[in-house]
Amino acid sequence: MKRQVPFLITLLAGIFCLIGFFVPHPAIRTFYDEIQQWVIVIVGATYVLGVANLLRINLKQVSGRERDWPYKIVLLLGMVAMMIVGFTEGSHYLDPTSGFSWMYNTFYSAMSATMFSLLAFFIASAAFRAFRIRTLEALLLAIAAFILMIGRVPIGNAIHPFIPAAADWLMEVPQNAAKRGILIGAAIGVMATGIRLILGMERAYGSSSGGGGA
Amino acid sequence: MPLIRSLGRAGRSAVALAGAALALVVFAGFAAAFPLNAINTPNDRGQSVTLTWTSPTPAPAHWILLRRERGGTFAPVDTLDGAMKTHTDEGEGAQGVQDGTTYEYRLIADPPNPALNSDISAAATPGPEWIDSTKVNVLVVTLLFFIVLFYFINQAHRGVRWKFRTIPGLIAIEEAIGRATEMGKGVLYIPGVQDIDDIQTIASLIILRNVARTTAKYETRLTVPTNAPAVYTVADEVVKSAYQDVGRADAYQSDQVRYVTSEQFAYVASVNGMMLRERPAANLLLGAFFAESLLLAETGHAIGAIQIAGTANVHQMPFFVVACDYTLIGEEYYAASALLSNEPLLLGSLKSADIVKLVLIVVIIIGCAMATFGNPALGLWFGTE
């Protein structure tokens, strides 16, 4: 029963949504749209569980004086402060002049931008490793990257107009061909995974191995 | 012209003005009112009529849209910008168009200018459709997929087995967990940064089940930080049930799977912090990733962890290829769970995906050949909106 009920729900919801994708008639589409709303409600409800998990794990680490526990206090205080300010301001919490917006823009946005800016250094270190020429493939990669980088800046055209044209060709022909091949393969993979899930052949939930059901 | 000449200057001017006025009247009277096309909006859920027209030049500032039921009296229903060339009349309630009722339309220039008014449109009857004709191509491929899939499921039930090429990244997953076990360190599993409604996240959670079974068998600590509460609840259930499957329910710890945050870079900061503090021996980055992919993978590289990544996001693949030891790209990622489970039914579904892919490759080649010789019909039919 514990396995059959989720399987039946998945099967019925999956087949219904598959039909709803192709049928615009209100007899199907009205309930199809309703189901999309259910998803939003269910996902919204899981935030309660998420916050509870966050509180439980971090309070446990603080009370046990586990490693780096002072940082957990900062995290908990930050979360509680944002929640208090957000709830106090009610439906106006997203107004540009609200305290919630001020806290978000002043603290979170700045810290988020700091994390993102680290990408520049990580790209440099990754590029250094990627362009070490050890094999024929690495040599081709390095040549393509060199043409592309030179072709995308004004000096490329100043050296020779062929360079930006070659860079465009690299992007439009070999790069596009490879990318589309990957995308077609991935799209078929999505379809196969979706059908396996709908038919209950593959599942992440429930105990014991997945299989059967089709 | 002796008569006109005899009229004098004032008389000639009066005749000229009268001629011009007559010409204007004649022109206005014979100016062809432009056609207005009205059709039941295709591929919709009904209660909608689509209007198209070619505006006269110059167009008026606004159009007043008139509508009547066939045989009834025109009444204004909307005011449209003069530059518009198409409009969908739907509305809601009693004022809106109703399925099964036949309507006729007319556009009236505003400010009024009878010369710019449209013809009365042909009658149109709104109604819903049962099949969206723009998705017929997808329907055909889906049905083909189902037919081939059921054939291979039947083959699997009859005991037929297939061989697939070895994917080094999949073999490396067990090796990486074994390495972590030998080193006495943990395994960090990152299921991407998308919510549970993303198919890449779902595929990741299915792979997580296999990974959790292996870590449970090897008694290796598995940590799964998630960035969506729904993913956390499902991942927690997946790991718990995987530990039960291998008879190690006692080894499952409730803080193995945790919700961190839904903010992208806050999540990165937290997971990178975990990597630097706990120094896992293996990082598995399987799911949908965006700008954070290299931030995570480079930090993992810096701590010397063996890293296996998998994603279908094409733009993040180069970063993973550079920074990780193994990368599952596109379809390899979606095939991973079936290959790891090695179950005949799942392998049969992979075989069916291969057959559909082969069919599509043949169709693409034929479509390219047809387009080269001036017939793009096949390519256009496969186009999606």
Image (cartoon, coloured by chain):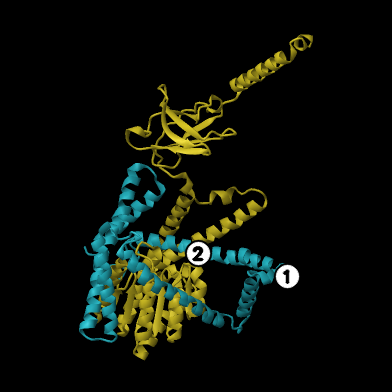
User: Residue flagged by tag 2: what amino acid is it?
Assistant: Gly
Tell me if I can see residue B89 in this picture.
yes
Return the residue found at the far bottom: B183
- Drawn colour of chain B? yellow
Q: Nearer the viewer, residue B348 or A187?
A: A187
Q: Is residue A165 left or right of residue A130?
A: right
User: Residue at label 1?
Assistant: A160
Q: Secondary structure at mark 2?
A: helix
Image quadrant containing the C terminus of chain A: bottom left
For the residues beneath circles 2 and 1, the answer to whether they share a chain is: yes
Q: Earlier in the sequence, mark 2 or mark 1?
A: 1
Please rate how many residues cluster around mark 1, counting C-alpha atoms within 10 Å: few if below 14, some from 14 to 19, many from 20: few
Image vertical order of residue B167 relative to residue A177, above or below: below
Q: Which residue is mark 2?
A: A185
What color is chain A drawn in?
Answer: cyan
Q: Chain of mark 2?
A: A
Identified by mark 1, the residue type is His
Q: Position of residue B126 (x, y in %)?
A: 41, 34
Q: Estimate the x, y position of residue B200 in percent, counting from the top left.
A: 40, 66
> In the depicted view, which residue is nearer to us: A124 or A107?
A107
Left-right relation of B365 to B310: right
